[in-house]
Amino acid sequence: MTDLTTPAPAPVPAFVPPTRFAVPGRIPVPEAASSVWRRAVITQIRPETPRTSTFRLAVPGWAGHQPGQYVTLRLTAADGYTAQRNYSVASAPDSSGHIELTLDHVVGGEVSGHLHTVARPGDTVEVRGPHSGFFAWSGDRPALLLGAGSGVVPLMSMVRHHRLRGLDVPLRLIVSARTREDLIYAAEYGPETTVLLTRAEGRLTAAHLAPHLSDPPRGGWEAYVCGGNGFAEHASRLLADGGQPLDRIRIERFG
């Protein structure tokens, strides 16, 4: 008897953009300001989900940021040991001298673990930035935002900026979370936002993007994708397959 087996399907190739990918529209970053370490004071710690909190920092001499940018945060122990991580800014640019960072509590994480379990209002940390003109959005062009989990953080900075400035440029956010309990900023979303709870509804599909990609605003969308590696690749592929120009898809990924 001949043993017939079905060959395994060929693996789907990774989404690899061309060299020109997301270069147009890059916002210059002032190197002098972004290279200086500044002592910041934690003024508020606000829970968002059971494992995520927002830390509000007063940063003397803060030169401001663009929505979508990130900072480097550094902790220094009494023995001089330092640990640092990069975190997206969650707050909109304003003149308050404060920024907000929303952090997942990563089990075993040196920085997030300390901030979630040890840090209290009045404690000091160091921040350097802002960094990255690549993922920044100045509010001058329509923005289609796709985020999963804590990937919504830099996108919420854009949404808050849009609201604070009363911008009339089109902006849409599709945010994905496992459950309602895992949804960061759950109370803040408005009519610009579509929430997808993946445990009950499944993952992001082309159908979620079709209403936006089939009838884009004048000038087209600037698409911003932020999340874990799997989500970032999946969402980017859906955008590209749906007709979004490759050089107008910006990706920030983690994990």
Image: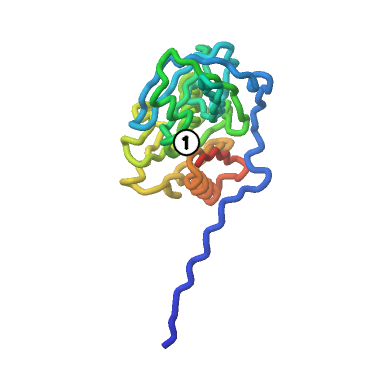
The image shows residue 239 at horizontal and vertical percentages of: 52, 46
Looking at the image, is 195 positioned above or below residue 40? below
Residue type at the position of mark 1? Gly
Rendered residue at 36%/32% (across/down): 51
The image shows residue 226 at horizontal and vertical percentages of: 50, 38
- Label 1 SS: helix
> Split into 4 quadrants, where in the image is the N terminus?
bottom left
Rendered residue at 58%/33% (across/down): 135
Res. 214 visible in picture: no
Quadrant in the rendering for residue 72: top right
Quadrant in the rendering for residue 36: top right
Looking at the image, is 163 positioned above or below residue 208? above
Rendered residue at 65%/19% (across/down): 33
Q: Callout 1: few (<14), some (14-19), or many (20+) C-alpha neighbours within 10 Å? A: many
The image shows residue 162 at horizontal and vertical percentages of: 49, 24
Q: Which residue is mark 1?
A: 151
